[in-house]
Amino acid sequence: MAARRLSSLLTRSVSLSSSFRGANYGVVSGMNRFSTATAAVEEPISPPVQINYTKLLINGQFVDSASGKTFPTLDPRTGEVIAHVAEGDTEDINRAVSAARKAFDEGPWPKMPAYERARVLLRFADLVEKHSDELAALETWDNGKTYEQAATAELPTFVRLFHYYAGWADKIHGLTAPADGPHHVQILHEPIGVAGQIIPWNFPLLMFAWKIGPALATGNTVVLKTAEQTPLTALYVAKLFHEAGLPPGVLNVISGYGPTAGAALASHMDVDKLAFTGSTDTGKIVLELAAKSNLKPVTLELGGKSPFIVCEDADIDKAVEEAHFALFFNQGQCCCAGSRTFVHERVYDEFLEKAKARALRRTVGDPFRQGVEQGPQIDSEQFDKVLRYIKSGVDSNATLECGGERIGSKGFFIQPTVFSNVQDNMLIAKDEIFGPVQSILKFKDLDEVIKRANATRYGLAAGVYTKNIDTANTLSRGLRAGTVWINCFDVFDAAIPFGGYKMSGHGREKGFYSLQNYLQVKAVVTPLKNPAWL
């Protein structure tokens, strides 16, 4: 299957809105430019979905937390409570790990023929596709991303990921190796055991798929901790997994907070492997907890400050649109966002004016409303953080070209913001802002931009816009990043590995390499008597 290009699936202009099935999903037409500030103050649209699952999933059953505590999950459009969700803690993690351990050691999942595991994954994917309307609405309600993004890009990608991993389930095999003496050597690839997984709030469903798909395809059992901001869709799809025939205890879902449930999972002595997606600072804590407990292996997909490099020969109109998408996609809440836009000095002024104009045209409002490109930030903490970085940019004498303010007085909406005259030593050029703030920097030549682009603690991704294949090759090999997109951005596919250099993480998600995260390698050596050959 051709690489799934999120940018081609999402609304890049209102011309695509005709393909959006608003009438079927309760989405209302109409849009507002952010400069009017009216979109965010309109009466919010009632999401067309019921909240049915708010408890913890342990050993195939939805149960209350051991403490009986709950916590609120909020609607980012208003800051109001959507539902109260069971708050998992150490005791709940212990119960979930115990269920996962029993399911691995005694249950049918790792002993099941791989083809049968594949059939469970395929049935699950079919159920998700059947319920994609409700799931897209729930994801939008709990997260604030646009419904169009959730329905037309993320849900199809979710289904495709599980088709991909179902296809791998019965194709994982070992090797035989020659020895220097009369011995038969088998190399086995075995499931690692109980996997602990911690996912973030910016792509709740997709991160579920990135983590759960390879873990289950390789025969493991899982305890998944969701982000406290976005617990709802993971609980919904976990229910569908059991409808598809997943045995009890194979998948356990705990909602709760990082310092309690997350720390308990990371430090648990009976968890065999840990996977985490989130900030670099939290990743350090997770890694330390894993090391101090049972030295469990850890994969980390962490932060980024990705360069987007526009060369002097680039098609400026296309580069402006791609750079805009690279930064503002998902309200800027994307680990690989192209948050440092480097533009060659000969085309800088033209690019800047067009980038500013594109930001001013960006539609902000209720993410359930047709034609809206940008919804609210996830919560008040992230909202306040973004505004502090904008103030930092102004205080550092970067030029605020547009935006920089909140929209309305309710919810967590921020104007699309563009800074020019940004210098490498400014916080807005160094830190991961995770919001709709585009920083545009000027460069003179390739050697300079490679050096500056690499002068960061991160190395998750990069974008390059050029018509010259030699320039593309020079930059793609010179940039220290796990993914380099040439004349495109955010091209994701189940088969394309994703992960970072430096402090952007360890290991890779998706593709063949993700399977290796959940497999142990065992050598079995047997003497041969009078072998006919070696």
Image: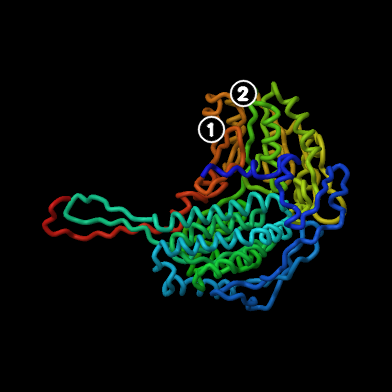
Amino acid type, residue under disc 1 in the picture? Ser
**Foreground: 135 or 268?**
135
Q: In the rendered view, would you say 423 is above or below 76?
A: above
Few, some or many residues within 10 Å of mark 1 (<14, 14–19, 20+): some
Q: Position of residue 467 (x, y in %)?
A: 59, 25
User: Element at badge 1?
Assistant: helix
Q: In the rendered view, would you say 279 is above or below 393?
A: below
Q: Is residue 427 visible?
A: no
Q: Is residue 451 visible?
A: yes
Q: In the rendered view, would you say 346 is above or below 263?
A: above
User: Which residue bears the numbered disc 1?
Assistant: 476
Amino acid type, residue under disc 2 in the picture? Asp
Indicate which disc, 2 or 1, sits on the residue closer to the N terminus.
Answer: 2
In the picture, measured across the screen, residue 287 lies left or right of residue 40, that is left
**Foreground: 481 or 139?**
139
In the picture, measured across the screen, residue 67 lies left or right of residue 385, that is left
Q: Position of residue 161 (x, y in %)?
A: 54, 53
User: Which label sits in the foreground, 2 or 1?
Assistant: 1
User: Which residue bears the numbered disc 2?
Assistant: 445
Q: Position of residue 491 (x, y in %)?
A: 58, 42
Q: Residue furthest top?
A: 346
Few, some or many residues within 10 Å of mark 2 (<14, 14–19, 20+): few
Residue drawn 68% across and 36% down? Answer: 323
Residue drawn 51% across and 55% down? Answer: 163
Residue drawn 57% across and 37% down? Answer: 485
Q: Residue furthest left?
A: 530
User: Element at badge 2?
Assistant: loop
- How is the model colour-coded? rainbow
Instruction: Give the CA separation, mark 2 to mark 1.
Output: 15 Å
